[in-house]
Amino acid sequence: MLRCLLVDFNSYFASVEQQARPELRGRPVGVVPMMADTTCCIAASYEAKAFGVKTGTQVAEARRLCPGMVFVEARHALYVEFHHRAIAAVDRVAPVEQVLSIDEMACGLPMGWSSRERATQLALRIKAALREELGECLRVSVGIAPNVFLAKQASNLQKPDGLVVLDEADLPGPLLGMKLDGLTGIARAMLARLQGHGIGTVEQLWRARREQLRTVWGGVAGEDFFDMLHGRTVERVAGPRRSLSHSHVLPPEQRNRDDACGVLDRLTQKAAMRLRREGLAAGAMAVGLRFAVRGQRLRWENAARLPHTQDTQTLLHTLGTLWAALPRHSPAPLKVGVVLYDLLPLAQASGNLFDDDTRRSGLWQAVDAINLRYGKHTVYCGSAHRARDAAPMRIAFNHIPDLGTEA
């Protein structure tokens, strides 16, 4: 029985740029986090993909593959705005039940629309609504199947602008032509584990027993994968958020110790605002650096426990303590990141008996309100002054940034 319709935007970031800038239409476009040959494409238009450029291709290599390539710096706020417009457009046709990422959403098929013919009609209406709302450059592939997992695989079978229905009676046929790591949830490490258990093709995976996949995955996740692959619905209650993180690849001019520290300060202030926005408190903090050493993956990390808090001043003090342990003669930093973890709802956090953060909670609530109304740099801690324009908003796979707190 068909239960799910999944909308998957094709080359989303690049398509938004082509829609917003007509001069880019029909041209090979690469979206990059910064204008530097040392970075890589975070998205490529289909015109660029025809030359072999894809997500993760370094800029220098992309220039070699496609001399006429046009590079544009990512505008994440614009992509989030288009994302919300897309959800509204789809939801007017069919209820959006899950937002899977910035460019994917899943709809439940309304009662009476689960037949192949009617579900296809619904998909065509969604495509038309998106063209009308977002423009002709925003093409989508739609997958229709018994569950979200199979709907995602169906959407991958025909790109761009595809529409594939995958019912239980069709299985496993259309999947057999896929590579094993082409299935959602099978990355490099899982591929190696499957191969270690004698499973090297989708057909072998299909024929594997449920108990065998539990062994491969090391728990119930393997049983869930078996059920999803065979068209069953898997429902598990999502656990509470465990961590909150921000990271930033430094542009060449900021690859020095002082600027790296300033950017970490800026990231910490953003993370603290997110904690307050989500009503959470952090009980631990970690910072990390990746260094710009050719041919080597050198990293440095440091972490500390702290009384559960959402106080910016407390987190910045912890950052200072962690940063002081960085060896003085470290190589030039390439990427910085901060992670807040051991998160609890604020009402469950006991805090510190000797330093009551509630004395400053009103202050930070006022600061947040001012920044939300007048802009992110209206009021901020002076320690981040040199990096106030650094570390702009980034879109993670499973997190849609809030334009008010993460811009």
Image (cartoon, rainbow, N blue to C red):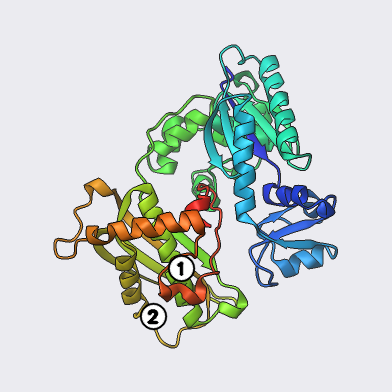
Mark 2: secondary structure: loop
Quarter holding residue 115: top right
Residue at coordinates 58% horizontally, 43% vertically from top-left? 200
- For residue 172, above or below residue 218: above
Label 2: which residue? 326
Mark 1: secondary structure: helix
Quarter holding residue 351: bottom left
The one nearer the camera, 159 or 378, is 378
Which of discs 1 and 2 lies nearer the camera? The answer is: 1
Separation of residues labelled 1 and 2 (CA atoms): 18 Å
- For residue 19, above or below residue 166: below
Label 1: which residue? 266
The percent position of residue 52, horizontal first and vertical second, equals 77, 56
N-term-proximal mark, 1 vs 2: 1
Q: In what quadrant of the picture does the N terminus appear?
A: top right
Residue at coordinates 34% horizontally, 76% vertically from top-left? 320
Q: Residue furthest left?
A: 353
Q: Amino acid at mark 1?
A: Arg
The percent position of residue 232, horizontal first and vertical second, equals 50, 24
The percent position of residue 284, horizontal first and vertical second, equals 30, 61
Q: Amino acid at mark 2?
A: Leu
Q: Is residue 201 visible?
A: no
Residue at coordinates 54% horizontally, 49% vertically from top-left? 397
128 with respect to 179 (left or right): right
The percent position of residue 18, horizontal first and vertical second, equals 77, 50
Mark 2 is surrounded, within 10 Å at the Cα level, by few (under 14), some (14 to 19) or many (20 or more) other residues, namely some
Quarter holding residue 380: bottom left
